[in-house]
Image (cartoon, rainbow, N blue to C red):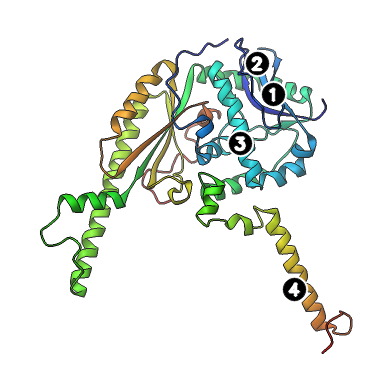
Amino acid sequence: MTTPSRLPEPYGQGQSANLADILERVLDKGVVIAGDIKINLLDIELLTIKLRLVVASVDKAKEMGIDWWESDPALSSRARHDELTRENAALRERLRELDPGRVPREAP
Amino acid sequence: MTGLRYVYAVCRPFDTPLQAQLGGVAGDPPRLLPHGDLVAVVSHVPEADFGEEALRAHLEDLDWLTATARAHQQVVDALTAVTTPLPLRLATVFRDDSGVRVMLEERESAFRRTLDRLEGRVEWGVKVYVEPERTEQADSERSAAPAEPEQRPVSGRDYLRRRRRQSRANEDLWSRAEEFATGLHRTLSGRADDARLHAPQNPRLSGAEGRNVLNAAYLVGRDASEEFVEMVDRTKDDAPGIRVELTGPWAAYSFAGEQEGTEEGAGKKAGEDS
């Protein structure tokens, strides 16, 4: 049973806390326990490293024109989708070169 | 409710009720799951979001991650107000209550050791930033050699001379900052029960002005916290071009790991390139 004694008023913490400060703690520190749901900590660490580069807030980053995660496949499902689309198009193109008869293309 | 169990923290049993409107990470208010003389603080979370695949995908979604991290921190924060929690890393998830109990049982002695070590203590974060532009300005105002301000370099040699002077001023500031940060860290460590150095945050993107040269965490008794905060406050105006930022009180995140010598990441030194 613990009863905390008086603490000073919070500084830059709670609701207003800098996201970088929060992520640094909840992702990087704290007790690491392998739960039943296994997530690859390496993934998270990678993410953390990238997030270190990030931000007080995502919006702020976007304002600053920092949006690389949107095009980084490791961070964005949208980017991964884009990448698939691109890859798909590239493959079609290649196929067309190899076998012009097979793949429908506009009449010359 | 079926679903998975998300564990925020492990504590000793406590009587004070948690603050009422805590939503938890998925809208389910955190509840206490006692086992022996430990309590796990858990929320029920849907498998659709916290199952293995979904979780992995979510963790790559910055908006989801942000919301979840904040919710996690809010619960830990509420716990810190009423007891000394041992915070777990984000997204520690079990199938059911009995999975959580088994975990508590297996790690009981380690948990108790750590909780004893942290008992009655909180974490304070202290960061030091260098703000070169501002100092350059201040310096040039102070030492304004006559006829010099705003003059364009008249020759290549003149230009180089200026460059050299400026880079010397910068070096000067950096070495002052390093000295300041090292001194501050030494002083604060002396007042804390434990200390950790974390990697500096990238200032360009963390939203903070200046460059982060010290990013440290201090484990401080609740009773000693007020004095600690005053001490940090007093250093704030000490050095021109250098800014000190205090955050806390946090749950003792940085000190929750089992102690075995120096922690990884503690090797990063103030002033080192990030």
The residue at 61%/15% (across/down) is B12
* First reached walking from the N terminus: tag 1 or tag 3: 1
Asked if residue B160 can be seen in this view, the reply is yes
Could you say which quadrant of the image residue B21 lies in?
A: top right
Query: Identity of the amino acid at label 3?
Result: Ala
Instruction: State the residue in front, B154 or B272.
Output: B154
**Toward the viewer: B209 or B231?**
B209
The residue beneath circle 3 is: B69
- Residue carrying label 1: B29
> Which amino acid type is marked by label 1?
Pro
Residue B31, image x, y percentages = 70, 20
Mark count? 4
Specify which label sits upstream in the sequence, 2 or 1: 1
Q: Mark 4 points at which residue?
A: A90
* Chain ID, mark 1: B
Seen from this angle, which residue lies furthest bottom?
A108
The span from disc 3 to disc 4 (Cα, nearest Å) is 39 Å
Q: Which of marks 4 and 1 is in front?
A: 1
Which is more foreground, mark 2 or mark 4?
A: 4
Q: Marks 4/1: CA distance?
A: 49 Å
Q: Distance between the residues labelled 1 and 3?
A: 15 Å
Write down the chain letter for disc 2: B
Q: What element carries label 1?
A: loop
Amino acid tagged 4: Ala
| Numbered disc in front, either 2 or 3 | 3
Q: Residue at x 48, y 20 (%)?
A: B121
